[in-house]
Amino acid sequence: MPRIVVDTSRCEGHGLCEGIAPDVFALHDEGAVEVLIKESVAGDAIEAAATAAALACPVAAIHVTS
């Protein structure tokens, strides 16, 4: 199962992750991102979406590990 980690100290609230993977990430009004998916329910499609969002993050705040 993938592990999705957001470094909130790096996150600048650009929202690309939410745009790419809205089922995985939500951007709060304060600009902080939250991971919506629990590791126990993450599957291949979720891992692919989270990885795409991590690659698109302009500040590299998202990390996906297996």
Image (cartoon, helix red, strand yellow):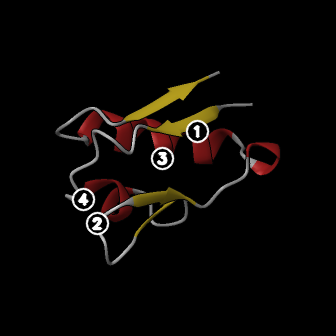
SS at mark 4 in the image:
loop
Residue type at mark 1: give it: Glu
Label 2: few (<14), some (14–19) or many (≥20) C-alpha neighbours in 10 Å: some
Marks 4 and 2 sit apart, C-alpha to C-alpha, by 4 Å
Is label 3 in contact with label 1 (beta carbons under 8 Å)?
A: yes
Label 4: few (<14), some (14–19) or many (≥20) C-alpha neighbours in 10 Å: some
Marks 3 and 1 sit apart, C-alpha to C-alpha, by 6 Å
Query: Could you tell me which residue is drawn at 54 percent across and 65 percent down?
Result: 23
On screen, 2 above or below 8?
above
Q: Disc 4 marks which residue? A: 13
Q: Which label belongs to residue 26?
A: none
Residue type at mark 2: give it: Gly
- Between circles 2 and 3, the one closer to the viewer is 2
Residue type at mark 4: give it: Gly
Location of residue 14 (image quadrant): bottom left
Q: Which label belongs to residue 47?
A: 1
Q: Which comes before the other along the chain, label 3 or label 4? A: 4
Marks 2 and 3 sit apart, C-alpha to C-alpha, by 20 Å
Q: Which comes before the other along the chain, label 1 or label 4? A: 4
SS at mark 3 in the image:
helix
Q: Left or right: where does residue 33 sit relative to residue 2?
A: left
Q: Disc 3 marks which residue? A: 49
**Relative to the observer, which residue lies in front, 49 or 38?**
38
On screen, 29 above or below 4?
below
